[in-house]
Amino acid sequence: MRPPPDQPRVWTYPPAARGNVIDDYHGTPVADPYRTLEDDDDPATRAWVAEQTALTESYLATLPERSGFRQRLAELWNHARVTPPVRRGAWLFFERNDGLQPQPVLYRQPAQGSGDPQVVLDPNTLSDDGTVALVSYSPSDDGGMLAYNLSSGGSDWQTVHVLDVATGTQLPDELRWCKFTGVAWLPDGSGFFYARYPAPGEVPEAAPSTHQRVCFHRLGTPQHQDALVHARPDEPGLGFHAVVDEQGDYLFLELWTGASARNGLAYRRLDAPANAPIEPLLDVDDALYQLLGNDGPVLYVLTDADAPRGRIVAIDARRPERDGWRELVPEGEDSIEAAALLGDRFMVNTLHHAHHRLARYALDGSPLGEVRLPALGSLSNLCGRRRDPELFATFSTFLQAASVLRVDPTTGEAGEFHRSDVDFDASAFETRQVFVHSRDGTRLPVFLTHARGLEPDGTHPTLLYGYGGFSISMTPTFNPSRLAWIERGGVYAHAVLRGGREYGDAWHQAGMLQRKQNVFDDFLAIGEWLVEQRYTRPERLAIEGRSNGGLLVAACLTQRPDLFGAVHCGVPVIDMLRYQRFTAGRFWIPEYGDAEADAEQFAALLAYAPLQRVRAGTAYPATIVTTADGDDRVVPMHARKFVAALQHADAGRNPVLLRADGKAGHGFGKPTNKVIEETGDVLAFLWHSLHHTQAAH
């Protein structure tokens, strides 16, 4: 039953069946009453989700803010968005969304001279509802052929197709059982290397997303004839990413385990016999190794080995031992997030208190100066190869939509390949960076964006966003939803937490495994600071996070329900004791730990696990949990079990709602209209809750 949105009352919810499941973890019994909600196909689960969906929609439909947010978001999203071009042969390939198209379209245009962009592939023609997405694409060296990956309904699973770009002919080649893979073309364009997983039943005993192998596909042949290049049945958790060097001499394999930023490297000469082994170079899980380029057997590598904030070294593949490395760009005060090698110039993207700087270095490591960036912001998607004359990259701020910069590596001059213009007066707003101290004294950067001259008086609806994990840096990025929030007088606070890579690998290590509570302490400290500094008060403070960030806000919700007035928990990881049993969950073990395999990790996980910390009779703040039926990365059982537990335990003064999208996934590839609808619903829920629901404390 839904209450009128402006009248406090006790909420009642469709009940979920509670079971008597009790698991034993290293001698500790743990109840799991909502185990049945893990089963997507259980009729009772489907019926419960349908009832929850009806309840949520009936409430959202009453919110006067809903239509206004959706309309404004459509206006703000309606601007051309372009990705940095990939240069192959005489062509530049890039994706463009004219504004409200469900999916971006792939174009090419001449790299030199004039010429209008030509449509190469329009994913919007591949489905009626815009839910087939172009996940990635790989042109051959001359730009004549294109391998591209498609996914449907938001799934991580992809199929690889091939297009003859010159003629527009779709080849019959179709490669299945792929995810987390790119394509590495042979120099002559006759075929490519890729990674795939076993077909169903091929390895019957295999856990989900294991036994990936590298194969070679020759154009015009069926997938079952693809040659096996490399597999590690003795290490079924290994994943592979294939790279062919620009000279066409070597096949390099990046070896990875889980979602760790650490990886290994292996290689083989392309002219070696087909059965020649792949030679190991650098150990898996030892450090980060990003191959930037090579001169024959001499590799140029970005690594954090013996340098937590990163350095660039030259490694001779014939003698890869660490004592033989030659340091080129040493570790500095700022963490290196990414780098590229163009000609004889290293283009190095560093993080300075969570915003980016771009510098140039000669091939011997001599510094050549910084590239002037337009403002304090984010530089991402560095795109350029050794043979390319210019670097392309995306630049954005909280108030400026993403533009594509083109940088001359020789002179350091930067210009614009594309600039996005948005229906928004950025001059009326400002972004400031402040620093907040966590419980243990750690200094945390925070970006505040709001109306220019805003006076802190304790009344402003404030949205605090965070992530804190998997070595992902939280830099200033453009999002129309933030503009829609601050235009109404709100404050947007962007938290930089341990678990990311803003200050290098040590910063990441400080927020993972048994140290995960540091991340929650950081976020709570920033929330408390916003209240202490009178930007807001608890009833007017909303928090938001997605995926690992969903875990963040769920943990903070259950630890400090009195600090917040509203919560958005998006596609969250919640069941920390069982997450590794589902789809991609095993990839996160290096980050979170494994409760079943390790007693110490179990104790750490149980201490903060949101599902087990829900307490009966607690007055929780207004909470909306969003998920999607097609999410095969963070499966929707996490959201279902959390909502069921909250609704069962909640004192009932504020809404606790589940918004489950029927045909979407974890987020990537979601059609623009679905993004606008969901974002509008979430913002309306948060804004209304901060003005109309009862304080949780």
Image (tube, helix red, strand yellow):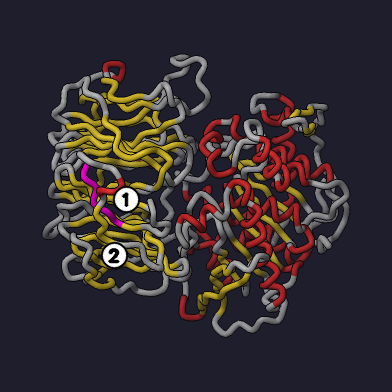
Q: Is 285 on the left or on the right of 520, as rendered?
A: left
Residue at position x 22%, y 70% from top?
368
Q: Is 565 on the left or on the right of 465, as rendered?
A: right
Tag 2's secondary structure?
strand
The label nearer to you, 2 versus 1, is 2
Q: Position of residue 362 (x, y in %)?
A: 19, 64
Does residue 423 appear in the picture of this structure? no
Residue flagged by tag 2: what amino acid is it?
Leu
Q: Is 460 on the left or on the right of 141, as rendered?
A: right
Which quarter shows the N terminus? top right
Tag 1's secondary structure?
strand
Q: Verify CB contact (< 8 Å) between mark 2 and mark 1.
A: no
Q: Position of residue 82 (x, y in %)?
A: 33, 56
Q: Earlier in the sequence, mark 2 or mark 1?
A: 1
Q: Position of residue 637 (x, y in %)?
A: 65, 35
Residue 405: mark in rendering: 2
Magenta segment boundaries in residue numbering: 312-317
Q: Of 29 and 73, which appears nearest the observer?
A: 29
Residue 95: mark in rendering: 1
Q: Position of residue 392 (x, y in %)?
A: 26, 59
Up the image or down, 318 lies above or below 342; here it is above
